[in-house]
Amino acid sequence: MTIKSISAAEVLPTLRGKKVLLRCDLNVPLKDDGQGNRIITDDGRIQASLPTINQLLEAGAALVIVAHLGRPKGEVKAELSLAPIAKRLGELIKYPVHFASDVVGSSAQQAVKNLKSGEVVLLENVRFEAAETSKDDEQRKGFAAQLTAFADFYVGDGFGAVHRKHASVYEAALELPHAAGNLIAAEVEVLRKLTQSPQRPYGVVLGGAKVSDKIGVINNLLDKVNLLAIGGGMVFTFLAATGKEIGKSLVELESVPLVKELLARAAQLGVEVLLPTDVVVAPAFADASPTVVSADAIPADQMGLDIGPASAQSFAAGIKGCKTVFWNGPMGVFEFSNFAAGTRVIAQALTEVDGLSVVGGGDSAAAVRALGFSDDQFGYISTGGGASLEYLEGKELPGLTALNA
Ligand code: ADP
Ligand code: MG
């Protein structure tokens, strides 16, 4: 599967003077500065979008950028406005960046009408429109038509959203002549290396908070990998499945039967599964006095917020023994320094892999940067978490299918 990219010789020259609808992934972590302002804490996904944005603008296109932030579920939520992202984009490129205060309403229509070659308009958070993520094909199609009315050509570059059958990712791409941007092209190239004859041993390290999303993924990855190391919030469902008390830790009890099956299948397949043997616990996230306990002895009134030091060392040894490693999901609540040590040790181990190491996921990428690692210490930092995992599972990704059509 090769996707036609905008860098293909025949595409760019045709875009001079044209309006291009560009789907980007600008879903960056933000925090409140205490005075009601939203501050971007890691602009990695904006940075990763710049090569395509600049290339299209240099080629003389006018860009209508579509992107989402968080999960507003079809409602306008002020804290999920893309306004701070428009501002940051304006600082990062030398072309004018306008911001539309709605997605397809009068502000967007006016901004697109006035848009000139070499200029950008960023539309407001596309997920403020319920039709973007609707399960109803016709609703998505109708909304996509409103977006594509703004442009002559579609460029898909929002890799982090390609696993979603959403209007701006799927239907909009199908309705216009289209091509993939540089980020999607680069992401797919790396993931193809991981799926087509990866050097072995091949290890996958999973953590983070999206328990149910990721447990399904493990099922499909089991027969592809040699080593599976599990930490983060999802690990407590695994520990519960092995009969341990997990106190107040994040857990999904309804997934316990599935996890039991997974562990049995892993044993049959000879996949080495690493679960933490010690855990950092505290009564609350912000607690200043965490303690390390055995995974067999998590107190009933505490929650597990990081893997313990012995577990981190054993995960690191497993990782360093691999020739190919993919890691998605922080090992602990790294946003608090008390619970960042596990993630730091794992990140360090990935930098020491003698082979290909890939970090994927918005929070995972933000975590390695926040912990002081630089991008070039890893084989690749993917902007996609869920999207990368689904690619590795061998699933069809709607956003890529549409760009291939
Ligand atoms: P990614 O964006 O890299 O795919 P996720 O969104 O799945 O990762 O998960 C990231 C979040 O997981 C972080 O905000 C982190 O605080 C949280 N997390 C990690 N470990 C735990 C834990 N033990 N309990 C609760 N949350 C956790
Ligand atoms: Mg995340």
Image: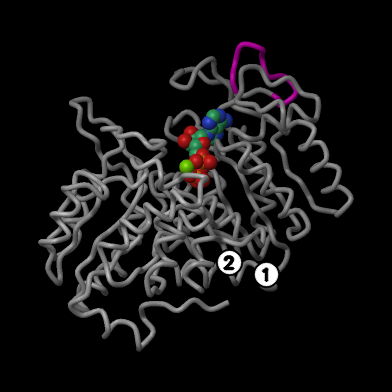
Task: Specify whether residue 146 is in view.
Answer: yes
Q: Secondary structure at mark 1?
A: loop
User: Residue at the location (64% across, 26% down)?
Assistant: 251
Query: In the displayed structure, would residue 201 be above or below residue 35?
Result: below
29 with respect to 235 (left or right):
left
User: Residue at the location (59% across, 33% down)?
Assistant: 233
Nearest the viewer among 40 and 185 is 185
Q: Which residues are magenta?
A: 294-303
Residue at mark 1:
198
Which badge, 1 or 2, comes first in the chain's sequence? 1
Label the magenta part by its dominant secondary structure: loop
Residue 301 shown in magenta:
yes
Query: In the displayed structure, would residue 94 be above or below residue 263?
Result: below
Q: Nearer the viewer, mark 1 or mark 2?
A: 1
Do labels 1 and 2 touch, CB within 8 Å? yes
Which disc, if any, is residue 356?
Answer: 2
Circle 2: is it few (<14), some (14-19), or many (20+) Cα within 10 Å?
many
Circle 1: is it few (<14), some (14-19), or many (20+) Cα within 10 Å?
some
Q: Secondary structure at mark 2?
A: strand
Number of numbered discs present?
A: 2
